[in-house]
Image (cartoon, grey):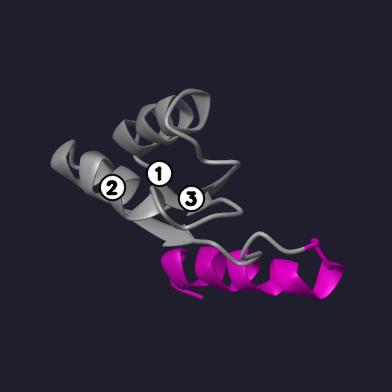
Amino acid sequence: MPTIAVLGAGPGLGLAVAKRFGTGGYDVVLVARRSEALADHVARLGANGVGAEAVAPFGGRVIMPFMATKPAKAMLRRAGM
């Protein structure tokens, strides 16, 4: 199944994009700086039949290039690689 990463997965546009692609047959990886709302987003997507995973690799800290490995690993996992 194809996988999409939604960067900046907030409650508005990010969640809408995730839902659109998810209902279109994509697995979804939600990526955001903070993890507070991501569990709720995953639950909302799951209620719509969308397989999703949440990743908050940055913890509100300055983004360093090596921190992007968490979302990349989640995408590979969702893609079955």
Quote the CA–CA distance across marks 3 and 2.
Answer: 11 Å
Which residue carries the number 3 mark?
A: 30
How many C-alpha atoms fall within 10 Å of the one at disc 3: few (<14), some, or many (≥20)? many
Quote the CA–CA distance across marks 1 and 3.
Answer: 12 Å
In the rendered view, tell whether residue 40 sits above or below residue 67. above
Tag 2: residue type?
Asp
Of the two numbered discs 3 and 2 on the same chain, state the one appearing first in sequence: 3
Residue 16 in magenta? Answer: no
Quarter of the figure that contains the N terminus: bottom left
Residue occupying image coordinates x 44% and y 72% = 80
Q: What secondary structure do most residues of the magenta stretch adopt?
A: helix
In the rendered view, tell whether residue 42 sits above or below residue 20. below
Q: Which residues are magenta?
A: 62-81
Q: Residue 35, how many percent across, how many down?
A: 46, 58
- Residue 13 bears which disc, if any? none
Residue occupying image coordinates x 61% and y 72% = 70
Q: Residue 30, how many percent across, how many down?
A: 48, 50
Q: Is residue 71 left or right of residue 35?
A: right
Residue 64 in magenta? Answer: yes
Which residue carries the number 2 mark?
A: 40
Quote the CA–CA distance across marks 2 and 1.
Answer: 19 Å
